[in-house]
């Protein structure tokens, strides 16, 4: 989709929004799949309500991109524009045990920055790619840690009320890969309250988690991490592995030999290949285990 409306084009500089024409989502996502559209880079939170009003009034459909590490995007010319937060400098400020983090900040860099200030707790999240905003959306977690446990407050743009709000941590529920944020809420900044720990101790935890990840995941290949959420009390990866599906492929989309819940783009996978593989695996798992696997990957198909 292209932004053509003169009223919008004229307003963008005043709203501190930068327009990037015809970006390829294949280049902006870790799976390396996705078509083309215009991208609006938002460089100031305060103008978001006005920007969103303007887009909605003029019928410009939009979706919000973080770091692109949990997304499967359709091919071709997309029917929506993409919004993305610009990164302020600095994007993390430490105040005692509180890290004030912009949603556009890289999650891994945030974990190490906090560690250097003797603030730990998030070691398990090292190696989860993407932004802090993306991690908040789905309550990213690994190795017994989830970001939601440390959230003191979140600044959000609430599309329903069309305004910026600050929510207290206790007002938000964080569950396994699920939060109580509305689907169109936009996370803008977060205050994380982290336990004090000596840097060398945190670093040891970080190294351990990095090693575990390297040993079990296809990190050199294009993927979106786990494709399916784990069903209660079970492991989606184990089920897929038990069905002997490692290496199974549809076109250029293939189940990793290292981790059966990682589906990789071997080079030129289309969105249809990846969706075909997801549907095929879901069907086989349902037939054998009677369980319908739910996507962890977010699919942008309209
Ligand atoms: C190799 C690899 C390993 C991974 N390992 C893990 C893991 O261990 N644990 C885990 O939980 N995940 C893992 N993931 C998945 C992914 O990294 C996380 O889900 C991550 O938190 C997504 O963040 P992102 O900024 O890339 O979001 P994106 O992929 O850009 O977006 C994902 C969703 O979040 C929304 N979103 C993004 N930013 C915001 C925002 N600021 N406000 C509102 N909505 C927003 C988008 O609209 C979209 O719906 C892995 C991925 C890869 C590629």
Image (spheres, rainbow, N blue to C red):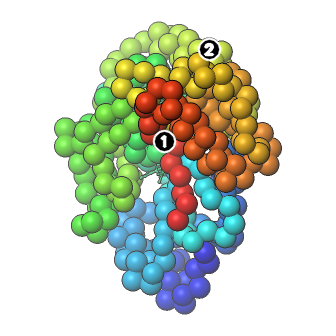
The residue pinned by badge 2 equals 211
Q: Which residue appears at 34% of the width and 18% of the height?
A: 196
| Residue nearest the observer in this picture, 183 or 272 | 272
Q: Above or below — where is 86 with respect to 176?
A: below
Q: Secondary structure at mark 1?
A: loop
Q: Which residue appears at 66% of the width and 27% of the height?
A: 245
- Say left or right for 191 vs 291: left
- Say left or right for 120 vs 13: left
Q: Where is residue 106 drawn, in percent x and y?
A: 53, 40
Instruction: Please tell me the numbered disc located at residue 103.
Output: none
Q: Where is residue 83 drawn, in percent x and y?
A: 51, 63
Q: Is the residue indicated by label 2 positioned so its CB lies within 8 Å of ligand 1? A: no
Q: Secondary structure at mark 2?
A: helix
The residue pinned by badge 1 equals 295
Q: Above or below — where is 15 with respect to 117?
A: below
For the N terminus, the image quarter is: bottom right
Q: Which residue appears at 44% of the width and 36% of the height?
A: 292
């Amino acid at each position: 989709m292209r932004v053509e409306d003169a009223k919008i084009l004229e307003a963008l500089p005043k709203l501190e929004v930068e327009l990037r024409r015809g970006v390829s989502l294949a280049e902006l996502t870790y799976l390396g799949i996705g078509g083309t559209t215009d991208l609006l880079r938002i460089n100031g939170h305060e103008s978001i309500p006005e920007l969103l009003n303007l887009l909605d009034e003029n019928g410009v459909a939009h979706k919000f991109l973080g770091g692109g590490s949990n997304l499967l995007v359709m091919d071709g010319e997309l029917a929506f524009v993409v919004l993305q937060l610009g990164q302020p400098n600095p994007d993390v400020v430490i105040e005692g045990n509180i890290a004030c983090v912009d949603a556009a900040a890289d999650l891994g860099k945030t974990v190490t920055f906090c560690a250097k200030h003797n603030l730990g707790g998030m070691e398990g999240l090292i190696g989860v790619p993407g932004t802090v905003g993306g991690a908040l959306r789905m309550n990213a977690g690994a190795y017994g840690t989830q970001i939601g446990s440390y959230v003191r407050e979140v600044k959000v743009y609430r599309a329903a009320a069309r305004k910026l709000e600050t929510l207290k941590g206790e007002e938000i529920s964080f569950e396994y890969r699920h939060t109580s944020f509305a689907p169109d809420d936009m996370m803008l900044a977060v205050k994380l309250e982290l336990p004090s720990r000596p840097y060398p101790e945190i670093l040891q935890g970080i190294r351990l988690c990095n090693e575990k990840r390297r040993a079990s995941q296809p990190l050199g290949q294009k993927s979106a991490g786990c494709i399916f959420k784990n069903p209660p009390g079970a492991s989606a990866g184990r089920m897929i592995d038990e069905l002997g599906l490692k290496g199974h492929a549809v076109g250029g989309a293939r189940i990793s030999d290292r981790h059966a819940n990682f589906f990789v783009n071997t080079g030129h996978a289309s969105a249809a290949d990846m969706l075909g593989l997801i549907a095929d695996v879901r069907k086989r798992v349902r037939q054998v285990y009677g369980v319908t696997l739910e996507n962890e990957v977010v699919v942008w198909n309209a």
